[in-house]
Image (tube, rainbow, N blue to C red):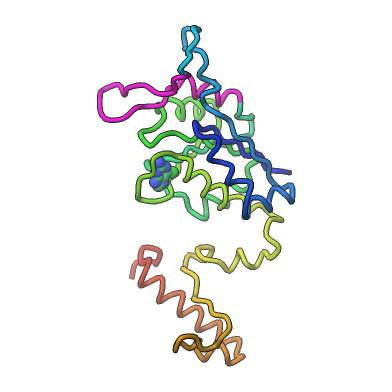
Protein backbone atom coordinates (compact mmCIF):
# COMPACT_ATOMS: atom_id res chain seq x y z
CA UNK A 1 0.00 0.00 0.00
CA UNK A 2 1.24 3.50 -0.82
CA UNK A 3 2.39 5.60 2.12
CA UNK A 4 0.79 9.00 2.58
CA UNK A 5 2.83 11.77 4.20
CA UNK A 6 1.19 15.00 5.34
CA UNK A 7 3.14 17.98 6.61
CA UNK A 8 1.55 20.82 8.57
CA UNK A 9 3.74 23.94 8.76
CA UNK A 10 3.72 27.74 8.67
CA UNK A 11 6.39 27.45 5.91
CA UNK A 12 4.74 25.27 3.22
CA UNK A 13 7.05 26.66 0.48
CA UNK A 14 9.99 25.11 2.32
CA UNK A 15 8.83 21.62 1.29
CA UNK A 16 9.43 22.16 -2.43
CA UNK A 17 12.62 20.23 -1.66
CA UNK A 18 10.50 17.05 -1.43
CA UNK A 19 10.07 17.16 -5.22
CA UNK A 20 13.77 16.56 -5.89
CA UNK A 21 16.37 13.91 -5.19
CA UNK A 22 15.69 10.57 -3.52
CA UNK A 23 12.16 11.30 -2.43
CA UNK A 24 11.28 12.31 -5.99
CA UNK A 25 12.21 8.75 -6.99
CA UNK A 26 10.01 7.20 -4.29
CA UNK A 27 7.14 9.31 -5.52
CA UNK A 28 7.81 8.43 -9.16
CA UNK A 29 7.62 4.77 -8.16
CA UNK A 30 4.25 5.63 -6.51
CA UNK A 31 5.44 4.32 -3.15
CA UNK A 32 4.64 7.58 -1.38
CA UNK A 33 2.48 10.67 -1.81
CA UNK A 34 3.09 13.93 0.02
CA UNK A 35 0.67 16.70 0.96
CA UNK A 36 1.76 19.97 2.52
CA UNK A 37 -0.69 22.12 4.50
CA UNK A 38 -0.37 25.72 5.68
CA UNK A 39 -1.17 25.86 9.40
CA UNK A 40 -2.41 29.45 8.99
CA UNK A 41 -5.29 28.15 6.86
CA UNK A 42 -6.67 26.76 10.13
CA UNK A 43 -6.24 30.07 11.98
CA UNK A 44 -8.79 32.20 10.08
CA UNK A 45 -11.15 32.13 13.07
CA UNK A 46 -10.42 32.45 16.79
CA UNK A 47 -11.71 29.94 19.35
CA UNK A 48 -14.68 32.29 19.98
CA UNK A 49 -15.68 32.21 16.30
CA UNK A 50 -14.61 35.77 15.41
CA UNK A 51 -12.45 36.35 12.33
CA UNK A 52 -8.68 36.70 12.83
CA UNK A 53 -7.27 38.63 9.87
CA UNK A 54 -3.74 38.04 11.23
CA UNK A 55 -4.30 34.25 11.38
CA UNK A 56 -2.45 34.04 14.70
CA UNK A 57 -0.81 30.68 15.41
CA UNK A 58 1.07 31.43 18.65
CA UNK A 59 0.71 33.12 22.03
CA UNK A 60 2.76 33.85 25.14
CA UNK A 61 3.62 30.92 27.43
CA UNK A 62 1.64 30.43 30.65
CA UNK A 63 4.10 30.79 33.52
CA UNK A 64 6.22 33.29 31.58
CA UNK A 65 9.51 32.84 29.77
CA UNK A 66 11.07 33.53 26.41
CA UNK A 67 9.48 32.90 23.04
CA UNK A 68 5.99 31.97 21.97
CA UNK A 69 4.01 28.74 22.10
CA UNK A 70 1.85 27.46 19.25
CA UNK A 71 -1.87 27.48 20.01
CA UNK A 72 -3.59 24.13 20.65
CA UNK A 73 -6.92 25.17 19.07
CA UNK A 74 -5.27 25.95 15.72
CA UNK A 75 -3.26 22.70 15.76
CA UNK A 76 -6.40 20.78 16.78
CA UNK A 77 -8.32 22.04 13.75
CA UNK A 78 -5.44 21.19 11.41
CA UNK A 79 -4.77 17.72 12.77
CA UNK A 80 -8.49 16.81 13.01
CA UNK A 81 -8.63 17.61 9.29
CA UNK A 82 -5.44 15.81 8.20
CA UNK A 83 -4.86 12.83 10.50
CA UNK A 84 -6.52 9.60 9.34
CA UNK A 85 -7.56 6.80 11.74
CA UNK A 86 -4.39 4.75 11.03
CA UNK A 87 -2.08 7.78 10.89
CA UNK A 88 0.98 8.31 13.09
CA UNK A 89 1.60 11.82 14.39
CA UNK A 90 5.29 12.80 14.26
CA UNK A 91 6.33 15.96 16.08
CA UNK A 92 9.93 17.03 15.42
CA UNK A 93 11.28 18.54 18.64
CA UNK A 94 14.71 18.97 20.24
CA UNK A 95 12.99 17.59 23.38
CA UNK A 96 11.93 14.36 21.61
CA UNK A 97 13.30 10.83 21.68
CA UNK A 98 16.32 10.25 19.41
CA UNK A 99 15.36 9.77 15.75
CA UNK A 100 17.28 6.58 14.93
CA UNK A 101 17.51 4.15 12.02
CA UNK A 102 15.35 1.75 14.09
CA UNK A 103 12.65 4.42 14.48
CA UNK A 104 12.85 5.27 10.77
CA UNK A 105 12.41 1.54 10.03
CA UNK A 106 9.28 1.33 12.21
CA UNK A 107 7.74 4.46 10.72
CA UNK A 108 8.39 3.24 7.15
CA UNK A 109 5.57 0.69 7.66
CA UNK A 110 2.92 3.27 8.65
CA UNK A 111 0.02 3.90 6.23
CA UNK A 112 0.12 7.63 7.01
CA UNK A 113 2.62 9.92 8.71
CA UNK A 114 1.62 13.43 9.74
CA UNK A 115 4.52 15.76 10.51
CA UNK A 116 3.51 18.62 12.80
CA UNK A 117 6.23 21.24 12.35
CA UNK A 118 6.34 23.74 15.18
CA UNK A 119 8.74 26.43 16.21
CA UNK A 120 11.40 25.22 18.62
CA UNK A 121 9.75 26.71 21.73
CA UNK A 122 7.11 24.19 20.88
CA UNK A 123 3.46 23.42 20.39
CA UNK A 124 1.15 23.55 23.44
CA UNK A 125 1.88 20.21 25.15
CA UNK A 126 -1.80 19.26 25.26
CA UNK A 127 -1.84 18.67 21.48
CA UNK A 128 0.41 15.58 21.67
CA UNK A 129 -1.40 14.46 24.83
CA UNK A 130 -4.83 14.80 23.19
CA UNK A 131 -4.03 12.68 20.12
CA UNK A 132 -2.26 10.05 22.26
CA UNK A 133 -5.38 9.90 24.49
CA UNK A 134 -7.45 9.46 21.33
CA UNK A 135 -5.45 6.31 20.51
CA UNK A 136 -3.00 7.66 17.93
CA UNK A 137 0.67 6.80 17.99
CA UNK A 138 2.40 10.11 18.73
CA UNK A 139 6.17 10.29 18.28
CA UNK A 140 8.06 13.38 19.43
CA UNK A 141 11.53 12.90 17.95
CA UNK A 142 14.81 14.84 17.79
CA UNK A 143 17.57 14.66 15.18
CA UNK A 144 20.33 15.27 17.70
CA UNK A 145 21.66 17.47 20.42
CA UNK A 146 21.53 20.86 18.78
CA UNK A 147 18.74 23.37 18.25
CA UNK A 148 17.07 24.27 14.95
CA UNK A 149 14.64 27.17 14.64
CA UNK A 150 11.72 24.93 13.80
CA UNK A 151 10.69 21.40 12.87
CA UNK A 152 10.85 21.88 9.09
CA UNK A 153 14.50 20.95 8.43
CA UNK A 154 14.16 18.03 10.84
CA UNK A 155 10.98 16.82 9.12
CA UNK A 156 12.69 16.78 5.71
CA UNK A 157 15.59 14.73 7.12
CA UNK A 158 13.17 12.29 8.78
CA UNK A 159 11.07 11.97 5.61
CA UNK A 160 14.15 11.12 3.54
CA UNK A 161 15.37 8.56 6.10
CA UNK A 162 11.91 6.94 6.27
CA UNK A 163 10.91 6.90 2.59
CA UNK A 164 14.15 5.27 1.42
CA UNK A 165 13.24 2.30 3.67
CA UNK A 166 9.83 1.73 2.09
CA UNK A 167 10.00 -1.77 0.55
CA UNK A 168 10.66 -1.48 -3.18
CA UNK A 169 12.27 1.95 -2.96
CA UNK A 170 15.97 1.32 -3.60
CA UNK A 171 16.94 -1.09 -6.35
CA UNK A 172 19.38 -2.97 -4.17
CA UNK A 173 18.04 -4.20 -0.82
CA UNK A 174 21.59 -5.28 0.12
CA UNK A 175 22.77 -1.68 0.08
CA UNK A 176 20.36 -0.97 2.95
CA UNK A 177 21.46 -4.07 4.89
CA UNK A 178 25.15 -3.11 4.52
CA UNK A 179 24.91 0.57 5.27
CA UNK A 180 25.86 2.55 8.32
CA UNK A 181 23.90 1.85 11.50
CA UNK A 182 21.89 -1.17 10.35
CA UNK A 183 24.48 -3.38 12.15
CA UNK A 184 25.11 -0.84 14.91
CA UNK A 185 28.57 0.11 13.58
CA UNK A 186 29.79 2.94 11.37
CA UNK A 187 30.53 2.11 7.74
CA UNK A 188 33.99 1.10 6.54
CA UNK A 189 35.89 3.54 4.26
CA UNK A 190 35.34 3.17 0.49
CA UNK A 191 37.73 3.77 -2.41
CA UNK A 192 37.56 3.81 -6.20
CA UNK A 193 40.01 4.41 -9.06
CA UNK A 194 42.71 5.63 -9.30
CA UNK A 195 44.53 3.25 -6.92
CA UNK A 196 47.02 6.05 -6.19
CA UNK A 197 45.89 9.69 -5.84
CA UNK A 198 47.97 12.64 -4.62
CA UNK A 199 50.38 10.24 -2.98
CA UNK A 200 47.64 8.34 -1.17
CA UNK A 201 47.28 4.63 -2.00
CA UNK A 202 44.19 2.46 -1.68
CA UNK A 203 44.87 -0.24 0.98
CA UNK A 204 46.54 -3.26 -0.69
CA UNK A 205 44.02 -5.76 0.66
CA UNK A 206 41.25 -4.16 -1.44
CA UNK A 207 43.26 -4.85 -4.62
CA UNK A 208 44.10 -8.44 -3.57
CA UNK A 209 40.92 -10.17 -4.71
CA UNK A 210 40.82 -12.15 -1.42
CA UNK A 211 37.16 -11.73 -0.52
CA UNK A 212 37.43 -13.19 2.99
CA UNK A 213 40.39 -10.95 3.83
CA UNK A 214 38.55 -7.93 2.43
CA UNK A 215 35.49 -8.68 4.56
CA UNK A 216 37.70 -9.09 7.65
CA UNK A 217 39.56 -5.81 6.93
CA UNK A 218 36.31 -3.94 6.45
CA UNK A 219 34.90 -5.28 9.72
CA UNK A 220 38.08 -4.19 11.57
CA UNK A 221 37.75 -0.74 10.00
CA UNK A 222 34.15 -0.55 11.17
CA UNK A 223 35.22 -1.41 14.72
CA UNK A 224 38.16 1.02 14.86
CA UNK A 225 36.13 3.85 13.34
CA UNK A 226 33.28 3.26 15.75
CA UNK A 227 35.69 3.11 18.74
CA UNK A 228 37.27 6.38 17.59
CA UNK A 229 34.20 8.38 16.55
CA UNK A 230 31.16 6.83 18.25
CA UNK A 231 32.21 4.82 21.31
CA UNK A 232 28.64 5.26 22.58
CA UNK A 233 27.51 2.74 19.93
CA UNK A 234 29.72 -0.06 21.33
CA UNK A 235 28.77 -2.36 24.22
CA UNK A 236 30.48 -1.37 27.53
CA UNK A 237 33.83 -3.17 28.01
CL1 LIG B 1 13.43 17.59 15.61
N1 LIG B 1 13.59 20.18 16.04
C1 LIG B 1 14.26 21.28 16.36
N2 LIG B 1 13.62 22.45 16.41
N3 LIG B 1 15.55 21.29 16.64
C2 LIG B 1 16.18 20.13 16.58
C3 LIG B 1 15.55 18.94 16.24
C4 LIG B 1 14.23 19.00 15.99
N4 LIG B 1 16.45 17.95 16.27
C5 LIG B 1 17.59 18.51 16.61
N5 LIG B 1 17.45 19.82 16.79
Q: Is residue 230 visible?
A: yes
Q: As displayed, is residue 225 above or below residue 176?
A: below
Please give the count of numbered marks on the rendered protein.
0
Q: Residue at x 49, y 24 (%)?
A: 75
Tell which of 66 and 216 is nearer to you: 66
Residue 77 percent location from the top left of the image: 54, 20
Q: As displayed, is residue 91 above or below residue 24?
A: above
Q: Quadrant of ligand 1?
A: top left
Tell which of 138 and 67 is nearer to you: 67
Tell which of 191 and 181 is nearer to you: 191
Q: Residue at x 54, y 80 (%)?
A: 191
Residue 126 percent location from the top left of the image: 42, 25
Drawn side of residue 21 relative to residue 152, left or right: right
Q: As displayed, is residue 192 above or below residue 107?
A: below
Q: Residue at x 66, y 52 (%)?
A: 166
Residue 148 percent location from the top left of the image: 39, 44
Tell which of 5 and 178 is nearer to you: 5
Drawn side of residue 66 relative to residue 229, left or right: left
* The magenta stretch spans residue 69: yes
Q: Quadrant of the N terminus?
A: top right
The answer to which quarter of the image holds residue 12 is: top right
Q: Residue at x 59, y 39 (%)?
A: 113
Q: Is residue 96 visible?
A: no
* The magenta stretch spans residue 220: no
* Residue situated furthest left in the rendering: 64
The answer to which quarter of the image holds residue 232 is: bottom left
Q: Quadrant of the C terminus?
A: bottom left
Residue 231 percent location from the top left of the image: 36, 67
Instruction: Magenta stretch: give its range.
Output: 55-81
Amino acid sequence: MRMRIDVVTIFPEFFGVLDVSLLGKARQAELVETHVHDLRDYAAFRADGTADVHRTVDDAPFGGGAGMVMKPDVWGKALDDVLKPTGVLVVPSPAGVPFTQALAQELSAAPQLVFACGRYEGIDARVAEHYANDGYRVVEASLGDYVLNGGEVAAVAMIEAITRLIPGFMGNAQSIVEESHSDGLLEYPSYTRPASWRGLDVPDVLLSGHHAKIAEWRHEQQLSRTRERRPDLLPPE
